[in-house]
Amino acid sequence: MKVTWESGDAYELYMGRWSRLVAKPFLDWLDPEPGLRWLDVGCGTGPLSDIILNHYKPAELYAVDQSESFIKSAQLRLRQGIQLRVGEATALPVEDAAVDITVSGLLLNIPPDPDRVLREMVRVTADSGSVAAYVWDYAGSMEMLNYFWDAAVELNLMAEVMHEGKRFADCNKPALRQLFSDAGLADITLTSFEITQEFPDFEQFWGPFQAGQGTAPTYLLQQPESDQAALRELLREHLPTASDGSIRLRARAWAIKGRVEKSLATPDDATTD
């Protein structure tokens, strides 16, 4: 199944609204000094970059995403002072040691080779600089997606192969720590952030799934209309709905940061058996 990530407006309704709630506490946790050179990898429509620009006085800010549409959306949302580039996270269009701090939100679980992505993030970061990221706790507390996929699997067992709670079960503290350790990062620290999102009614919850952005919406729109209707009603039954019709859901994100130690590497290190 080819997953669509092209419409910036649709992404904002589906996942951007969640990402923005995590971006601020994530950056507060990093507590960076002003005047740094930044890179936002997989910037999407720019939720992280927006806060960096407005609160952390960057000397420079680069932002990279593989989606030209997302980059265009970010250009419309963000003011001057950011260098937006279309590019792959596995081959960042940024020079070696060009930035002091590299960040990424909701990306490391997506590429088939997250090790390669992280090596690129280290490459473009200066010695003693920082690399940091956050991902959803898909297997634990990402209720919006877990309710959707649990209902989808109840109706069609084949949906289990797309269940993000199963596919990204390694989005956890031990796996993230190992990923950063393998990349040679030092002083690795992890934390988590819990957020909540309230939908006024079921229609507000359901609407973003019909926009076709992301794994769950793409799956939904590929189903026959009768199956879509059945999934809709099953979700309506399962969701925790208050007496006024509102739906309040939780999400947890794991965050991790490490320090680049390029000064410790030597030419001999690369050839040691």
Image: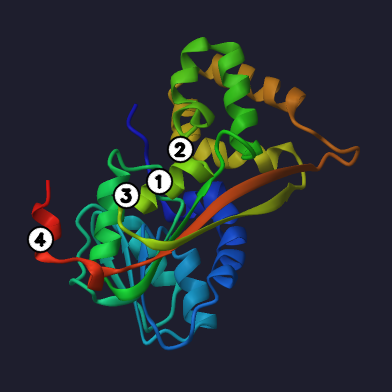
Callout 1 touching callout 3 (CB < 8 Å): yes
- Which coloring applies here? rainbow
Please tell me how crowded label 4 is: few (under 14), some (14-19), or many (20+) other residues with Cα within 10 Å.
Answer: few
Q: Secondary structure at mark 4?
A: helix
Q: Which residue is mark 3?
A: 182
Callout 4 touching callout 2 (CB < 8 Å): no
Q: Amino acid at mark 4?
A: Asp
Please tell me how crowded label 2 is: few (under 14), some (14-19), or many (20+) other residues with Cα within 10 Å.
Answer: many
Q: Which residue is mark 2?
A: 212
Alpha carbons under labels 3 and 2: distance apart? 35 Å
Which residue shows up at 37% across the image and 84% down it? 81
Which residue shows up at 65% across the image and 45% down it? 251
Q: Is residue 99 left or right of residue 273?
A: right
Alpha carbons under labels 4 and 3: distance apart? 18 Å
- First in sequence: mark 3 or mark 2? 3
Q: Is residue 2 above or below residue 71?
A: above
Q: Amino acid at mark 3?
A: Asp
Q: Is residue 44 left or right of residue 247?
A: left
Q: Nearer the viewer, residue 262 or 264?
A: 264
Q: Where does the C terminus fall, quadrant-wise?
A: top left
Q: Secondary structure at mark 3?
A: helix
Q: Which residue is mark 1?
A: 178
Q: Which residue is mark 4?
A: 268
Residue 167 in percent (x, y) is at: 45, 29
